[in-house]
Image (cartoon, rainbow, N blue to C red):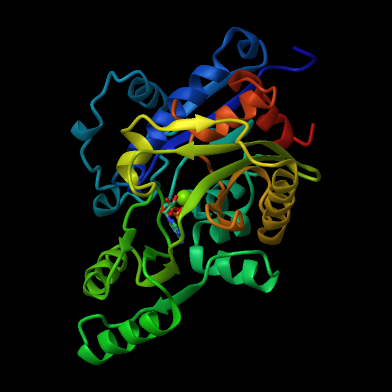
Amino acid sequence: MIGGKKKCIGLIFGGESNEHEVSISSAKTVFKAFNSEINKQRFTVKPFYISKFGDWLESGLSEQILFDEIEINSIKKQGIFNQEKFNFLEGIEFQNVDVWFPLLHGFNGEDGSIHGFLQFTKKPLVGCGIIGSALGMDKILMKTIFSNLKLPQVNYLVFQNENLKDKEVQNKLTNEILKKLNFPVFVKPSNSGSSLGISKVVNESELLPALEKAKGIDPRILVEEGLDVREIECGIIGKSKLLTSEIGEVKYESDWYDYDSKYYSNNKIKIPAEIDPKTTKEIKEIAIKSCRALNIFGFARVDFFLEKSSSKIFLNEINTIPGFTKNSMFPMLWEASGLKIEQLVAKLVDISLDL
Ligand SMILES: Nc1ncnc2c1ncn2[C@@H]1O[C@H](COP(=O)(O)OP(=O)(O)O)[C@@H](O)[C@H]1O
Ligand SMILES: [Mg+2]
């Protein structure tokens, strides 16, 4: 390595969100990449596992989770706050960490909370800051900003904190949806991920159950007009200058890209996607513009819809801590763009250090 001691990477994974298992899979990939022959010269890794109850585990135990030596469902809630022990990091040795790599998907992680928390340690981190993370996680705020910039999006409606048990409210929402959007519609919790809590609704009778389901995750709900689309994704890395990866397309056998088709089926990923050069260029431009709009940097995956009938581009969402599982698009996009996973993780650290 060039000068200085090895950098210690604090890899944080697991977490309280419903994407806990996805985070563990992502962390396995990243841990292995930092421990590869080429990276071992430059880096050491200290993993920190956060249980489903929000308890932090020390590095030795965390590493055992990454090697499947501990069954995660056997981990009990520590109940630290009930024991009048307020320092929930007691016994968690993180003084030697040089750079944080938070790999928590969803709630209490990707939504900016971990970024805010880590800011107190005064150490750099891989990814963006509090604002970008929080906005990237909140579909309603993200869409509002994109609308302001006239970035192309599907038609949508926002419902916040509505009492769905009230008949009058039920009628009001149903009427508004019927008046302003065409079926099918997608009903989504504003704050979620991995398609959890999302329903595709094809007729009026399915609306209320879908709204209830979304509300079970977040009282702020988004209802979008559903189009017949190709799903296109673009990777972003960088800070003062954002770089785009090749564009990828994911094809699945299910009707839409729901949780099961994301993680349990044999999706076909095509990189580069078969799209014309003009559309490719436009997608890359929108990817950068959208990240800048939300102050997102470090790394991100920007997802688009390409309407099959019209070939129109619609910006869907930005994921500020993209998946790194073995089926994940983000590392594949960069591999196709010339950065193998080992090079990619090292590059992300360099970006966080402004190198
Ligand atoms: N407006 C839409 N039109 C067509 N398909 C959609 C629409 N919104 C969502 N979907 C489908 O649902 C999937 C998940 O939606 P998305 O908003 O990306 O949520 P998540 O953040 O959970 O990934 C999309 O990848 C797509 O397959
Ligand atoms: Mg998505």
Residue sitting at 31 percent across and 60 percent down?
199
Is the residue 278 above or below the residue 253 in the image? below
Task: Return the x and y of residue 242 as percentages of the image width and height.
Answer: 76, 43
**Nearer-the-camera pick, 225 or 170:** 225
Query: In the displayed structure, does residue 354 sit left or right of residue 280?
Result: right
Query: In the displayed structure, does residue 62 sit left or right of residue 29?
Result: left
Residue found farthest to the top: 37
Locate the C terminus by quadrant.
top right
**Nearer-the-camera pick, 243 or 34:** 243
**Nearer-the-camera pick, 14 or 281:** 281
Residue sitting at 38 percent across and 32 percent down?
24
**Quadrant hosting residue 151:** bottom right
Task: Return the x and y of residue 120 as percentages of the image width and height.
Answer: 59, 49
Task: Return the x and y of residue 90 as percentages of the image width and height.
Answer: 40, 39
**Nearer-the-camera pick, 312 or 331:** 312
Residue found farthest to the bottom: 168
Say whether residue 345 is visible.
no
Residue sitting at 54 percent across and 22 percent down?
45
Task: Return the x and y of residue 85 as percentages of the image width and height.
Answer: 32, 49
Residue sitting at 63 percent across and 64 percent down?
152
Is the residue 342 above or below the residue 72 in the image? above
Is the residue 163 above or below the residue 269 in the image? below
**Quadrant hosting residue 263:** top left
Number of numbered tags placed on the structure image: 0
